[in-house]
Structures are given as C-alpha cells and as structure tokens.
Amino acid sequence: MAKRKAVVSTKECVACGCCMKVCPRSAITVPKGVFAEINRDLCVGCGLCARECPASVITLEVAE
C-alpha cells in the first residue's frame, strides 16, 4: 500500500486551525494565520485533518 500525505490548497485555506487541532502528530501549523502548512516528514496520512476541514481544502495524495 502506498503511503499518503496530506496536502493543503493554500489559496483556498481559511486558516481556521481545525486541522491543526485534530492532527495526532502535530504535523500542521497555521503560521501568521494565513494558511495551514503540513510538515510532510511528520504527516502519517491518517486523513483526520481532511475530514475535519470545514472548507474541504485538504486532500490526501500518494507520497513520492
């Protein structure tokens, strides 16, 4: 099974922080309240952030 990683559409992100609150690995930050950033080294691809995002701007993609 291929590993997945979360990816944020930064142009559409509303920086609400919902994804950051549910991430079990603390892989998500919202620096300066602009948009969410995901540390791909910490992300385990669980998908909790994508399910929690009210703007539906987080997707899971196959990691390279």
Image (cartoon, rainbow, N blue to C red):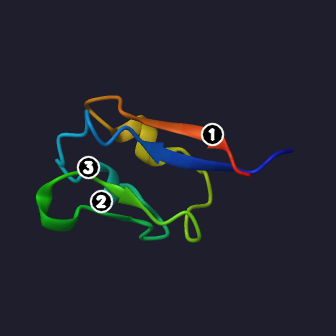
Q: Quick one: which residue is furthest to the top in this view?
A: 56
Q: Earlier in the sequence, mark 1 or mark 3?
A: 3
Callout 1 crowding tier (Cα within 10 Å): few <14, some 14–19, many ≥20: few
Horizontal side of residue 30 vs 61, given as left or right:
left
Name the residue: 13% across, 65% down. 32
Q: Earlier in the sequence, mark 2 or mark 1?
A: 2
* Tag 1 residue: 61
* Tag 3 residue: 18
Q: Mark 1 and mark 3 in contact? Answer it, CB < 8 Å.
A: no
Horizontal side of residue 49 vs 62, given as left or right:
left
Label 1 residue SS: strand
What is the quadrant of the N terminus in the image?
A: top right
Q: Mark 2 and mark 1 in contact? Answer it, CB < 8 Å.
A: no
Q: Where is residue 41 drawn, in percent x and y?
A: 59, 70
Nearer to me, 44 or 8 = 8
Q: Amino acid at mark 2?
A: Lys
Callout 3 crowding tier (Cα within 10 Å): few <14, some 14–19, many ≥20: some
Horizontal side of residue 56 vs 25, given as left or right:
left
Q: Which mark is residue 21?
A: 2
